[in-house]
Image (cartoon, helix red, strand yellow):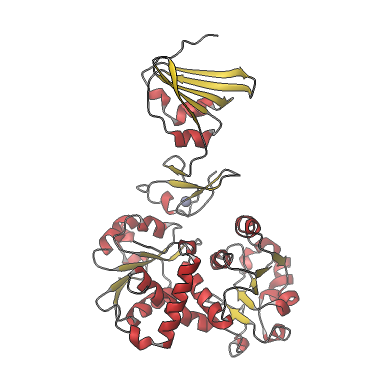
Amino acid sequence: MRHLIDITDLTVGEIDELISVSERIIDDRQSFSDICKGKKIATLFFEPSTRTRLSFEAAMLELGGSVLGFASADSSSASKGESVSDTVRTVGCYADIIAMRHPKEGAPMAASKYSPVPIINAGDGGHNHPTQTLADLLTIQREKKRLDSFTIGFCGDLMFGRTVHSLINALSRYENIKFIFISPEELRLPAYIKEDTLNKKGIPFTEVERLERVIPMLDILYMTRVQRERFFNEADYVRLKDSYILEPQKLLSAKKDLSILHPLPRVNEISHNIDDDPRACYFKQVLNGKYIRMALILKLLGLEG
Amino acid sequence: MKIDEIQNGIVLDHIKAGNSMKIYKYLDLDRLDCTVALIRNVKSNKMGKKDIIKIDSPIEINLDILGYIDSGITVNIIKNCILTGKHHLELPEKLTNVLRCRNPRCITTEESNLDSVFRLTDRENCVYRCEYCEAESV
Ligand SMILES: [Zn+2]
């Protein structure tokens, strides 16, 4: 039985396959509309994340299946101290597949060792969130028509941003990608990722402090939020904060076919004035997230090869 | 100093000087009834100083733990006073219930029923990471 705990659980070939199934779903939603008839997904959300939960539930409903589950730990058995292994062994009797969100890192991995049905990691603390990465990859594929040969900039909090780490990891397996990391010094990408994922594979990257300098070089810009409390001192925050906010002025020097991604929710790091710019892809990314979750559910249930 | 040769058992040789007490503890050798000799700071041409442990009983030892603590150790198996096997160790790929994860956000720190599993992710630098949260062992 297959689970999806970490994006690297999938081979590049399997990711390509998920992308192509997603594109078939997008082109012909009707023919997938009852493929999961009689199947149930349990969304076990030990911490609330409404958008991710709704994405999984919408995905299953659009495949003709049904959903059950809980939306936070206080409405679940976890509040009575039940272990994740017992929870999934129980829920596995009712559902055909489980999407699990948990505040503790590694909880879905622990669950996968005991579960009688496939587990999808829907986010475990600050650790992994592989279906966000799949949504990112599908968005890049649909915007660029390829997953290789481009320059991608990651902007914001690169130290704690799990979606950034996971996407870098996934993209490091494709050819000819240049990475530019744009962050304040204290929020740079962790050294182990630079070392283990990039240097070891000889993948080039650049680190800069200001977005303005590099924006003309980018084919893709992946924005993340920078929180004030992550800065070591107020002076640096004041000096740099505007550099991590994307507003129309900065886009003047950007490529015409730049694709702007953001895992959402945003606070103020992307100005609302950009939402109507054709280069803004973050709401398409949300929609793509649903389609690739549909493809993933089919794959893990063995319904679509 | 002379220690009686063993008849049926195990000799752990080429232990890095100072590591023998740690091995004694990790392998629970204090639970054994048989003769156990722990010899420290033996002169060695190759190593300068080394430790040796002799166990006069053909016990099963966990080579993974041993390899993790000190992969330079040679394990000699003795049967009827004759050397019948010699094993060189290497860093094990996986350690189960040897290390505990120190990441307070890790599920294993909350749920003690889970096996604690660490995997070797970088042989060159001897890096082990928690299978659950991927935190490095310390
Ligand atoms: Zn851990």
Q: Residue at x 51, y 80 (%)?
A: A285
Q: Position of residue A2 (x, y in %)?
A: 37, 62
Question: As drawn, is A38 to the left or to the right of B112?
Answer: left
Rendered-image quadrant of the C terminus of chain A: bottom left
The residue at 54%/68% (across/down) is A163
Q: Is residue A24 above or below residue A4?
A: below
Q: Quadrant of the N terminus of chain A?
A: bottom left
> What residue is shown at x 56% (from left), y 81% (from top)?
A145
Q: Quadrant of residue B9?
A: top left
Q: Nearer the viewer, residue A161 or A305?
A: A305
Q: How many marks?
A: 0
**Above or below B15: residue A84:** below
Residue B107 coordinates in the image, percent (x, y): 42, 54
Quadrant in the rendering for residue A45: bottom left
What residue is drawn where x is 41% and y is 30%?
Answer: B61
Q: Is residue A82 visible?
A: no
B53 and A55: which one is in front? B53
* x, y percent for residue A175: 61, 68
* A247 w.r.t. B9: above or below: below
Viewer-side residue, B104 vs A189: A189
At which x and y percent is residue A88? 31, 60
Is residue A194 visible to us here? yes
Work out whether residue A177 or residue A129 is closer to the camera in this orientation and state it: A177
